[in-house]
Amino acid sequence: MQCLYNTICALQAFKPRSRLIMENKKKILIYDTSKGFSRFIKLNFSDRYDVTLFFDYKDFRDIRFEEYSAGFFIINESIEAFDLMLIYSKLKSLIVGSRVPIISKNLNNVDDITIIDLTKSRQEMVEFIDFNLKIFAVAE
């Protein structure tokens, strides 16, 4: 019984510290309706960043965009380009990728976004994202 009590006490003592660690993490937002890229980001970056996932533009109604250091927006269908317009000017730093060839080509004409090539290997994307997130952190 004493062992169980000590374990509970240890967990309670640890809880505020873990909350403090979470508060110090930079927040990044991910919009990805296919959920594959968002899962990739969460798996590779959630240890260093507080990752918030969105799968529908309607979820943006109550978001305080100023809390986020960066955002990822993955366009899986052409119609989602309109969803991008809803948050384009609200985020400080935005990384956009598309699986739609015509959209990918036209993203090069948009100012103030960083374009990610979703055809790259996982390792290349991790390096690209890590590099850009560090740049965004310096720019804040």
Image (cartoon, rainbow, N blue to C red):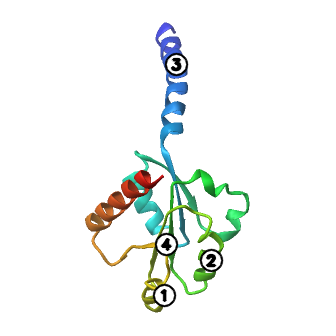
Looking at the image, tell me whether mark 3 or mark 4 is earlier in sequence order: 3
Q: Residue at x 40, y 52 (%)?
A: 138
Q: Mark 3 or 4, which is nearer the eye?
A: 4
Name the residue at 46% across, 11% down.
Answer: 3
Dot 3: element: helix
Type of amino acid under label 3 = Ala
Q: Nearer the viewer, mark 1 or mark 4?
A: 4
Q: Is residue 22 above or below residue 133?
A: above
> In terms of secondary structure, where does tag 2 sit?
helix
Mark 2 Cα shell of 10 Å, populated few (<14), some (14-19), many (≥20): few
Q: Pointer 1: residues within 10 angstroms few (<14), some, or many (20+)? A: some
52 with respect to 58 (left or right): left
Question: Residue 64 or 126: which is nearer the viewer?
Answer: 64
**Type of amino acid under label 4:** Asp
Mark 4 Cα shell of 10 Å, populated few (<14), some (14-19), many (≥20): few
Q: What amino acid is at disc 1?
A: Ile
Q: Earlier in the sequence, mark 1 or mark 3?
A: 3
What residue would you read off at disc 3?
13
Give the label on residue 103, or none: 1
- Disc 4 target residue: 112
Residue on which the image places disc 2 = 85
* Position of 97 relative to 130 (above/below): below
Q: Are marks 1 and 4 in contact (CB under 8 Å)?
A: no
Which x, y percent locates residue 75? 51, 78
